[in-house]
Image (cartoon, grey):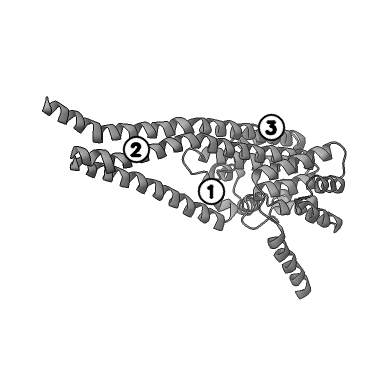
């Protein structure tokens, strides 16, 4: 027993020092290439070997290939890509139930969309941030040069107050985001998901994404002929605290207590209410699996649409904030100047 622990610990330490941080864009690219190679008739080992040749500078594929040679599952070997836990569990489910190629491509598309949205968000934020910086320089210049020459000490106080509020809000927001993100990294995936779906504006996007993950996994497992107890037993072996593992434990607990699934669906946000309608339709496992996979596809599309809608609101919102700053600057400085000119006349 100690030997096994030592070996596992050596593997764990090795992974820490050998697995480098891989970006969302790279993860998406690798999953899409792997899925397309398998779709074109290549075996798993051939696909990984091909990727190791195409990406010779990225040593991660040599580690994956070694795992495959040692008899590990491809879903387990892909841990070197540092995939999100939810997607990693989906790959395990897919390989077990014979839909690996499809889920590889779909997961790649999902990560690719995430990378594109991040890049687009940076582009949308660049111009408004430049304008905000320019306004700050303008306010600072007015405070240091223009206002003292006009002899308006009261207006200097207003500008100081405005700059303190502006910078205080920015610093408070950045520090708050850093603390919140570090907190999310320390808790389990399920707890993290519970908090993300409660966020304003983006909470609905996260909810659709996690519901897509749950429905897709259920659809794949039902299509392979598994019943609810077998699905819960398999998912209960996933990483402790992961979304699928916690949900399986909740279902098992409710079944032992004699509670109905409808009550669990009503109380669990990650189980969409549409599940009750699907269960009422009846039919065999094949029809149920098709309905679940169809629902997951709809949730996937809704996730992408919601992301696009939010991104389209970012720039107008930023320009609205800039407009408020311009108006505040106008009221602080220009109106008193007009008052002085009126008094002189």
Q: Is residue 183 left or right of residue 215?
A: left
Residue 178 appearing in the image: yes
Q: Position of residue 140 (x, y in %)?
A: 32, 42
Residue 138: which numbered mark, if any?
2
In the image, what residue occupies the spot 66% across and 38% down?
112
Which residue has dot 1 on it? 194
Q: Position of residue 311 (x, y in %)?
A: 52, 33
Q: Is residue 230 left or right of residue 125?
A: right
Q: CA distance from mark 1 to mark 3?
A: 24 Å
Which residue has dot 3 on it? 294
Q: CA distance from mark 2 to mark 3?
A: 55 Å
- Where residue 144 sits, quadrant-wise, is top left
Mark 2 element type: helix
Q: Position of residue 200 (x, y in %)?
A: 46, 40
In the image, what residue occupies the spot 66% across and 33% down?
295
Looking at the rendered image, the disc whose residue lies closer to the viewer, 2 or 3, is 2
Who comes first in sequence, dot 1 or dot 3? 1
Looking at the rendered image, the disc whose residue lies closer to the viewer, 1 or 2, is 2
């Amino acid at each position: 027993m100690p030997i096994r622990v030592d070996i596992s610990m050596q593997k764990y330490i090795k992974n820490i020092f050998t697995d480098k941080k891989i970006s969302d864009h790279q993860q998406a690219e690798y999953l899409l290439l792997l899925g397309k190679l398998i779709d074109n008739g290549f075996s798993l080992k051939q696909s990984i070997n091909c990727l190791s040749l195409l990406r010779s500078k990225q040593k991660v594929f040599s580690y994956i290939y070694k795992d495959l040679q040692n008899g590990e599952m491809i879903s387990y070997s892909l841990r070197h890509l540092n995939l999100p836990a939810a997607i990693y569990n989906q790959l395990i489910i897919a390989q077990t139930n014979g839909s690996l190629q499809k889920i590889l491509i779909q997961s790649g598309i999902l990560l690719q969309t995430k990378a594109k949205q991040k890049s687009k968000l940076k582009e949308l934020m660049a111009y408004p941030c430049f304008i905000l910086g320019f306004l700050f320089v303008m306010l600072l210049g007015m405070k240091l040069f223009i206002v003292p020459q006009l002899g308006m000490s009261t207006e200097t106080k207003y500008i100081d107050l405005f700059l303190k509020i502006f910078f205080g809000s920015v610093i408070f927001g950045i520090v708050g985001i850093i603390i919140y993100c570090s907190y999310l990294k320390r808790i389990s995936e399920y707890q993290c998901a519970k908090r993300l779906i409660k966020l304003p504006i983006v909470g609905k996007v996260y909810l659709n994404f996690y519901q897509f993950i749950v429905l897709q996994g259920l659809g794949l497992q039902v299509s392979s002929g598994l019943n609810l107890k077998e699905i819960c037993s398999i998912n209960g072996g996933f990483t402790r605290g992961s979304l699928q593992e916690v949900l399986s434990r909740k279902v098992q607990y409710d079944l032992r207590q004699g509670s109905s699934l409808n009550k669990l669906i009503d109380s669990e946000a990650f189980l969409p209410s549409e599940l009750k309608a699907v269960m009422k339709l009846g039919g065999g496992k094949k029809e149920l699996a098709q309905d679940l996979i169809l629902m997951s596809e709809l949730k996937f599309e809704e996730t992408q649409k919601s992301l696009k809608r939010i991104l389209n609101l970012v720039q107008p919102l930023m320009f609205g904030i800039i407009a408020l700053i311009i108006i505040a600057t106008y009221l602080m400085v220009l109106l008193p100047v007009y008052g002085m000119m009126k008094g002189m006349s």
